[in-house]
Amino acid sequence: MTAPAPQPSTPDNSSSLADLRVQIDSLDQQLLDLLNRRAHVAEQVGEVKKREGTPFFRPDRVAQVIEKMQQSNGGPLKDVHVAAIWREIMSACLALESPQRVAVLGPEGTFCEQAAVEYFGGAADLIYCANFDEVFHATAAGSAQYGVVGVENSTEGVVTRSLDLFLHSPTHVVGEVSLLVRHHLLRTTNELGGIEAVLAHPQALAQCQTWLSKHLPNAERRAVSSNAEGARLAAGNPAWAALASERAATRFGLHIVAHAIQDDSYNRTRFAVICLPQTLAMPPSSGKDCTSLVVSVPNRPGAVHDLLVPLKNNNVSMTRFESRPARTGQWEYYFYIDLDGHPSQPNVAAALAELRKLCAFYKVIGAYPVTA
């Protein structure tokens, strides 16, 4: 016997709190029954995918379902909350089909972990790595199906180590997460006095330098592998403090001595979701995509200028251009470029074909939907 679908109720000002709680309890049970019915169907989907050899995780399918639910949303739930709820529902159902192993920067409580949860949902099986090198290695070796790495911060610019690792990694980018990053000062005691050292990732220390110079001018700024690692270490020394997330404060039992001390109140970090092409091929065009590539050109006058000509001729916008030394000792560089669009679009395909002819080295890092 199937459970009836929950029906919207008309507000009744005469209902008591006890009556309303009875209604909520009844609706909760109906929702649970429906969710379990959905989970049974998801298990059948998993069996079909196993037989056909198709990917279990399809980010484009997740986006389509969420968009459809938002379009049919009649309120009062906000669309952002509908998205969060359905992402978790789909994550839990996917875990029944095939748990997704995702490598992230550890320990628990990093912003990288938070980005992974936002993208894959809370049911993902997270593998914590000491640095981004290990995230790339775990993903390339297959011990994780996906990896999440920081690539750019709105205050401090690109994460250079990630760019360098993309150069020779067999992985490619299939998605991104843009995260609003708030750095809190964490400590075992809820006071500012007596702090001898502040521990954090170098980018976090740079993003909070104005506040630290004003309020803790004499404290040592000590770089560690991640903000969560700084929180873990600060939990063992009352003279140390950390710059980390609220998640890290909860995880390591620390007080938030000062909230959101980053210099830029709109500080954001962009994370890339990576995997091997055999795990998930390039996502189809969503209509709002980014194509990332790395190239090098012969060291001759006008070579960099020539890279821009195919883009202009084919009406393709460039949204990012970064250079990194090739480490050959010959003053040669690799150029990391983000383009607005997808290789399936004729103008982007034409621009890439022309661009490739000019390059001594050419690699498409990925093409993926962009986030707001």
Image (spheres, grey):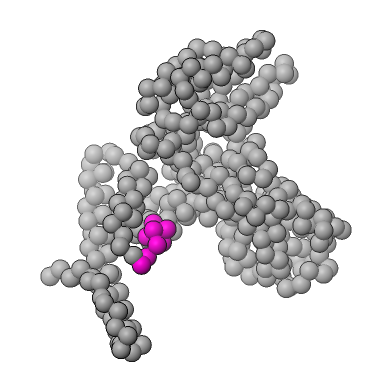
Expressed as whole percent of the image width and height from the top left, the position of residue 21 reads 33, 83
- Residue at 37%, 45% in the rendered image: 59
Q: Residue furthest left?
A: 1
Q: Residue furthest front?
A: 13
Q: Quadrant of residue 279?
A: top left
Judge whether residue 123 can be spotted in this image: no
Expressed as whole percent of the image width and height from the top left, the position of residue 28 reads 30, 74
Residue 306: say if magenta. Answer: no
Question: Against 92, is 352 above or below?
Answer: above
- Residue at 12%, 70% in the rendered image: 1
Please name the predominant secondary structure of the magenta segment in the image: helix
Count of numbered tags: 0
Q: Quadrant of residue 234?
A: bottom right
Expressed as whole percent of the image width and height from the top left, the position of residue 80 reads 42, 58
- Residue at 78%, 53% in the rendered image: 210
Instruction: Answer left or right for 242 relative to 282.
Output: right
Residue bounds of the magenta highlight: 76-83
Q: Quadrant of residue 215?
A: bottom right
Judge whether residue 198 can be spotted in this image: yes
Expressed as whole percent of the image width and height from the top left, the position of residue 60 reads 35, 43
Q: Residue furthest right?
A: 218
Instruction: Answer left or right for 113 relative to 74.
Output: right
Question: Against 301, is 145 above or below?
Answer: below
Q: Foreground: 8 or 27?
A: 8
